[in-house]
Image (spheres, helix red, strand yellow):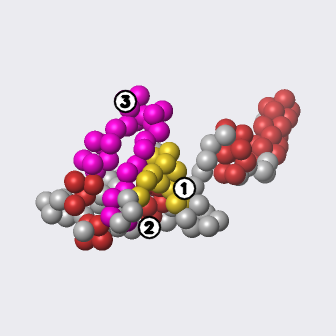
Amino acid sequence: MQPRLRTALGLLAGLFIFTSCAPRETPVEEGIRTQTLLVGNQNEPATLDPALIDAATDMNISVALFEGLTCYDEKTGGPVPGVAERWDISPDGLTYTFHLRPTATWSNGDRVTAGDFAYSFQRLLSPALGSTYAYMLW
């Protein structure tokens, strides 16, 4: 083997060994660098339809994708505004009136309406849909 070729192959092998030993970027470091939130989930979701979710792994994703009328305060466990900026409860406690944020929009820019929420609840309660937890809302 020619000395130049041997030297070049030696340098190439050394470079390969050196670069293969370099520390790889961890997922956390990549997330910080790219400003990307990385969340581990135990399984692939069975569904992304909020009305059909019945597993914690699906709910983890749903909570990140959808905002309800209210959210909950992680410190107190009480309700805080979500899409509804405020709500009123009738004196008898049977009627709740939610006032939607006027700036609430869907991902396509359409305004979120009370009709959207009414449709979602009616669909969820429909026996034809077969939602696992619909009985909890009756």
Disc 1 to disc 2, how far (Cα)? 22 Å
Residue in the foreground of this view, choosing between 119 and 34 = 119
Instruction: Establish if 113 lies above or below 60.
Output: above
Judged from the image, the secondary structure of the residue bearing numbered disc 3 is loop
What x and y, as percent, mark residue 88?
A: 43, 53
At label 1, the amino acid type is Val
Could you tell me which residue is drawn at 29 percent across and 60 percent down? 52
Which label sits in the foreground, 1 or 2? 1
User: From this viewpoint, is residue 70 visible?
Assistant: yes
| The quarter of the displayed image where residue 125 is located | bottom left
Judged from the image, the secondary structure of the residue bearing numbered disc 2 is helix
What x and y, as percent, mark residue 33?
A: 72, 40
Does residue 6 appear left or right of residue 70 in this picture? right
Could you tell me which residue is drawn at 49 percent across and 48 percent down? 86
What x and y, as percent, mark residue 22?
A: 79, 48
* Residue placed under numbered mark 1 in the picture: 80
Could you tell me which residue is drawn at 39 percent across and 63 percent down? 91
At label 3, the amino acid type is Asp
Judged from the image, the secondary structure of the residue bearing numbered disc 1 is strand
| The quarter of the displayed image where residue 74 is located | bottom right
Pointer 1: residues within 10 angstroms few (<14), some, or many (20+)? some
Looking at the rendering, the stretch of residues picked out in magenta corresponds to: 93-120
User: From this viewpoint, is residue 108 visible?
Assistant: no
* Residue placed under numbered mark 3 in the picture: 110
* Residue placed under numbered mark 2 in the picture: 56
Quarter of the picture holding the C terminus: bottom left
Residue in the foreground of this view, choosing between 121 and 23 = 121
Residue 45 covered by magenta stretch: no
Q: Residue furthest left?
A: 128
